[in-house]
Amino acid sequence: MNSPVVVVPKALRTRRPAAATMRALLLDEYGGPEVLRIGQRPLPEPGPGDLRVRVVSAGLQPVDAAVRRGCFAHGGAFASTLPLTPGNEFSGVADRVGTGIGHFRVGEAVLGWTLLNACAEYVVVPAEQVLHKPSILPWDEAAALSASGQTAHTALQALDLKRGETLLVHGAAGGVGTMAVQLARARGLRVIGTASARNHDYLRVLGAEPVEYGAGLLERLRNMAPQGIDAALDAAGGQALYVSLEAVRLRRRIVTLVEFIKAELFGVQAIRSQQSAARLAELLQLQARGQLRVHVSGRYPLEDAAAAHREIEDGHVRGKLVLRVGSEP
């Protein structure tokens, strides 16, 4: 007897296995925090020399809000086409190791940086942008260390300060400011930090001498440092750069992280973070010695990314915010 003929419907004959996907924070259009949404993106695969990381936490900073608003839509460090996934620093677990990598194993705790894509369940990055996470460093703090820490380190390196000199840090209670104060104190510098009155006790704990920003700032600075201020780091913008021009004798000893057009006009240094594994490793060593503290003032689930962005744009974040993306192992 002949076997019965089974007719397979055409739809089933042509169906392919569904591509693996992951949850990610998505930006389909530029605008306010409300344009952020959670969606699906293809699960990225690591190439040779790459590491895929299952993200536990992603650090947040003002540049994330700038990306969302479209400040890099026509070029710049974070230029990308829509849709995109924001986020440039993370902590997580090595999930898949590309060929040619011998110093990472699947399941190891790591932290690192990337150009976008960190606010997702998985991120693929070159292995040289990832370090092993010390077991004593909590996941959220590990996620918030890389971007602000390396930016502050880059700025201080550019200023080439000597022990005993006085550094003025504008926006000292923010993410970069918090790092800059501690790095400067570790180098034996006197640090004066501008902040709102509610953050003055916080700055004292970090080792800075606080001063309130706003009208009369220059006079207050001259009273605090009658012998003069040797250098200034502007992490705030606006009035901060003009005050620095009056307070610091040599313009090459002024660094701004925000006023790039005015920097060229006035002949001061405009700095962008120069990131490297060696720089991040030095920050981790300082953290291990108790000389560098990562302050995370707010933790949001991935679904509340819009609320986190609103807090960033409020301009009063103490230290850093993080998005909790996945569970701890």
Image (cartoon, rainbow, N blue to C red):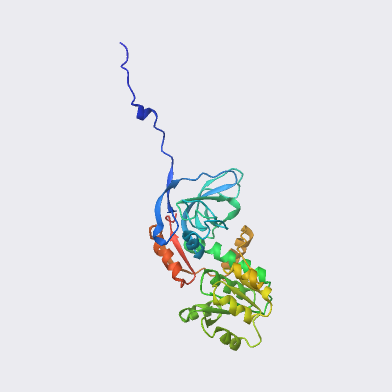
Q: Quadrant of the N terminus?
A: top left
Note whether residue 167 is visible. Answer: no
Residue sitting nearer the eye, 128 or 168: 168
Q: How many marks?
A: 0
Looking at this view, name the residue that lies furthest to the top.
Answer: 1
Residue sitting nearer the eye, 296 or 316: 316
Which x, y percent locates residue 201? 49, 80
Which residue is at a point 36% across and 29% down the rendered structure image? 12
Relative to 272, is 203 above or below?
below
Q: Quadrant of the C terminus?
A: bottom left
| Residue 301: quarter of image | bottom left
Which residue is at a point 44% across and 70% down the rendered structure image? 314
Which residue is at a point 57% across and 47% down the rendered structure image? 50
Which x, y percent locates residue 28? 43, 52
In the drawing, does residue 176 fall left or right of residue 254? left
Relative to 158, is 12 above or below?
above
Which x, y percent locates residue 125? 55, 51
In the drawing, does residue 306 fall left or right of residue 127? left
Which x, y percent locates residue 283? 59, 65
Relative to 110, is 210 above or below?
below
Residue sitting nearer the eye, 237 or 283: 237
Relative to 226, is 198 above or below?
above
